[in-house]
Amino acid sequence: MGRVSLLIGPIGQLVTAKSMPWRYGDQVLIMENAGIAVDGNKIIEVGSWDTIGSKYEGECRIPAEESLVTAGLIDPHTHLLFSGSREDELELKLEGVPYEEILRRGGGIYRTVSATVGATDNELRRILLNRLFEVAKYGTTTIEVKSGYGIELNQEIRLLRIINDPSIKAPIDVVPTYLVHVPPRDMDRGEYVNMVMGSLDKVKGLAKFVDVFCDEGAFTVQETRGILREASRRGFGLRLHADEIAYIGCSDLVREFSIASLDHLLNLPEQNARLIAEGGSVATLLPVTILSLMSSKRPPVKALRGAGVPIALGSDFSPNSWSLNMQYAMELATYLLGMAPIEVLMAATVNAAYSLGFRDRGIIQPGYLADIVVWDTPNYRWLSYELGRNKVLAVIKRGAVLDSTPMGTVISKECA
Ligand SMILES: N=CN[C@@H](CCC(=O)O)C(=O)O
Ligand SMILES: [Zn+2]
């Protein structure tokens, strides 16, 4: 009998992608009475519990007869690092004042910039760490975190240093992105864009991706093009906030650049789905933001599927859209966007991993990282079906069972 650090099984239902990215209609692995053997930070074998349970002895074991087991959730789009809040914009939104108008008046992102710039490094570190612990309780095991509430370049660099700070003992993996968010109000925007392009060497090593908010009220296609060109020359991965507020041609930039992910896409023209597929980009949809924008628009899911675009989901946690819970994004993806439960699960695991450039996680197969969630649900459909409850039973990150399960449930004495 082989000895391993962790055994999970018997498992009621194991659901995982077979390869990445996952496209609508691709096969998945759905297995009942399954088992997973983990050693160190990796999955070493997946199979029927009859085989796994008799072949391995675990230093600890998580029994999961009644449970769904999936890859850990991956959140590929967040604005986790900011100070303050904007609950007082709710009344404006309810009166019908559009997002871009609040921004034009100096509210929205600009207010959060003032609050964030006014916070000390220690305050921001504490905020970030608390949020990272909270997302882990909801099953997120890897998360992208954008800068963007500094605007001024030294402030952006400060935020990126905090995101990268090794003294922050994050329970999960963090992917830093430099977000060029909105033009400053007190400076010529052309000059600012030039400064951004000139600052990219300083950002190297602090961010895996450069992202631009390309939209009405933010950066134009021409400005975005310049920033993406310089970023890709320097070897950054590219992401884009595109076609969220209006279509001004941002998604067309996939013709010119290899963009890992185009995000939001509420106003994406259906014919541009083909361009995204040809460009090899992922479409990351952010349904919680659709709700918090109080928008009646929807991204064209059917056109994206039809063109073969891999779809990912993100929380888009921000002061405009306050939810750290990827499960909420998953629920809304079904009820607001019409995404099928299996599509939702693939979007929040394997495709989110793929969009962040990972090839080592998001799938439960030998050789992959042991980032795994045990759910308090009998099958995968419940992740879409049941609204508003944290359905996590246990989170395993790199083979380690995270300390506190949300409901204080002790899974197994040896593992806890
Ligand atoms: N759209 C741009 N940025 C964020 C919102 C930021 C904010 O409103 O503070 C987003 O992705 O939703
Ligand atoms: Zn965003």
Image (tube, grey):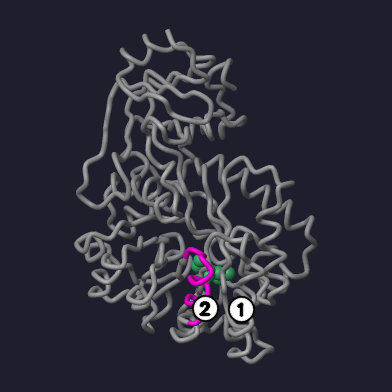
Q: Quadrant of residue 282?
A: bottom left
Q: CA distance from mark 1 to mark 2?
A: 7 Å
Residue in the picture at 53% in, 84% down: 101
Which circle's residue, 1 or 2, is located before the other in the chain? Answer: 1
Q: Which residues are magenta?
A: 226-237
Residue 402 to residue 125: above or below? above
For disc 1, the marked residue is 196
Q: Amino acid at mark 2?
A: Ile
For disc 2, the marked residue is 227
Is ligand 1 within 8 Å of the beta carbon of the residue shown at mark 1?
A: no
Residue in front for this viewpoint, 157 or 331: 157
Residue in the picture at 59% in, 72% down: 89
Q: Main secondary structure of the magenta part?
A: helix
Residue 370 to residue 279: above or below? above
Residue in the picture at 28% in, 57% down: 338
The quadrant of the rendering that contains the N terminus is top left
The quadrant of the rendering that contains the C terminus is top right
- Give the x, y percent position of residue 82: 66, 63
Q: Amino acid at mark 1?
A: Val
- Give the x, y percent position of residue 276: 30, 68
The answer to whether the residue labelled 1 contacts the one labelled 2, judged by CB atoms less than 8 Å apart, is yes
Q: Secondary structure at mark 2?
A: helix
